[in-house]
């Protein structure tokens, strides 16, 4: 970022500037690609990592690299934002339901992570991103996503959709319907999309945003969740709706479209993170083969520096 000493204010400004520069679907997709590689990082830090090192593919702090048998030797430090918490005990605010010590984010500080290319030591299997337009689907991914449907109290039906579409989510009936004409790749991709809708949306939606614009936002969110989850599992997808992100963000908030993009990115990344964690657990439990990008243990390789906190 051009400075030896970088403050949290510098990073916040760089983040806001980068988000405001977003114009195309390719800009949005590059952040989703980074989110697929670094699922433990929040949207803001994903943008910051991509800004400082666009080709990073395995990021951790120095302490984690040491645990993995490697040492940091390069000088390409990647600065990210880490929440600073206050500790609030039950005695401070009276009785609590669980009697636990609660934390509140009171600010952010700068933390440093490094890509694997700036380390030396024990050989590791490097992760990889899916090849463009890859239609390779890991065995068991359909079952893993189906479990998510039933875990949320929805049902899944594969039959003629009745409206000519590849599928849809019926929130009132609590079911996802997929067309029975889809090939395996398209069916898994569509199921991931509908699971994104199921996790993020409701039958009516909320807010004063016009219906057509709101539908556009919902489609981008669902498609983005599917894109991250599938990319994490080595499946390449395209999403034409990404081309409209900047446009509808300006419609939702003409004065500050960047805030809309940031909020949407946070919702998408948080939902995708939960799906990545649960689908990984299912695939590992059932001993199904995973592509390299998903083979990295989430609890050891992608933790932000120090103790975990709310994602930025």
Image (cartoon, rainbow, N blue to C red):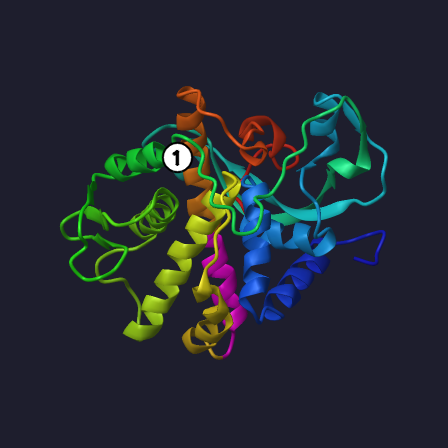
Asked if residue 193 is positioned above or below residue 243 in the image, the reply reads above
**Camera-side residue of 51 and 182:** 182
Which is the main secondary structure of the residues drawn in magenta?
Answer: helix
Which quadrant of the figure contains the N terminus?
Answer: bottom right
Residue range in magenta is 255-268
Side of 41 relative to 5 (left or right):
left
Q: Position of residue 32 (x, y in %)?
A: 54, 52
Side of 290 relative to 198 (left or right):
right
Measuring 81% from the left and 45% from the top, which residue is drawn there?
A: 76
Measuring 36% from the left and 68% from the top, which residue is drawn there?
A: 216
Asked if residue 286 is positioned above or below residue 236 in the image, the reply reads above
**Camera-side residue of 216 and 295:** 295
Q: Which residue does the numbered mark 1 point to in the structure image?
A: 141
Measuring 48% from the left and 53% from the top, which residue is drawn there?
A: 266
Side of 133 relative to 218 (left or right):
right
Q: Position of residue 138 (x, y in %)?
A: 45, 34
Q: Is residue 256 magenta?
A: yes
**Camera-side residue of 75 and 309:** 75
Asked if residue 47 is positioned above or below residue 249 in the image, the reply reads above
Measuring 59% from the left and 42% from the top, which residue is drawn there?
A: 37
**Image quadrant in which you'd find residue 309:** top right
**Image quadrant in which you'd find residue 96:** top left
**SS at mark 1 in the image:** helix
Q: Is residue 209 visible?
A: no
């Amino acid at each position: 970022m051009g400075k030896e000493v970088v403050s949290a204010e510098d990073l916040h400004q760089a983040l806001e500037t980068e988000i405001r520069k977003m114009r195309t679907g390719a800009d949005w997709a590059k952040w989703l690609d980074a989110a697929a590689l670094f699922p433990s990082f929040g949207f803001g830090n994903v943008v910051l990592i991509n800004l400082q090192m666009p080709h990073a593919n395995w990021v951790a702090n120095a302490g984690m690299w040491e645990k993995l048998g490697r040492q940091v030797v390069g000088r390409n430090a990647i600065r990210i934002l880490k929440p600073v918490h206050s500790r609030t005990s039950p005695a401070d605010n009276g009785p609590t339901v669980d009697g636990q010590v609660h934390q509140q984010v009171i600010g952010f500080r700068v933390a440093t992570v490094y890509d694997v290319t700036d380390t030396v030591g024990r050989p590791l299997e490097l992760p990889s991103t899916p090849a463009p337009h890859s239609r390779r689907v890991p065995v068991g991914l359909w079952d893993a996503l189906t479990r998510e449907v039933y875990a949320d109290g929805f049902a899944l039906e594969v039959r003629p959709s009745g409206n000519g579409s590849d599928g849809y989510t019926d929130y009132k009936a609590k079911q996802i319907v997929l067309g029975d004409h889809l090939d395996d790749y398209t069916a898994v991709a569509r199921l991931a999309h509908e699971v994104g809708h199921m996790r993020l949306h409701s039958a009516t939606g909320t807010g004063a945003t016009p219906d057509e614009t709101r539908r556009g936002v919902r489609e981008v969110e669902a498609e983005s969740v599917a894109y991250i989850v599938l990319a994490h599992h080595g499946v390449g997808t395209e999403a034409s709706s990404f081309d409209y992100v900047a446009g509808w963000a300006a419609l939702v908030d003409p004065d500050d479209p960047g805030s809309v993009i940031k909020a949407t990115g946070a919702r998408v990344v948080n939902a995708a993170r939960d799906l990545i964690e649960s689908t990984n657990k299912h695939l590992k439990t059932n001993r199904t083969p995973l592509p390299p990008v998903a083979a990295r243990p989430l609890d050891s390789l992608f933790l932000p520096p120090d103790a975990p906190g709310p994602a930025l």
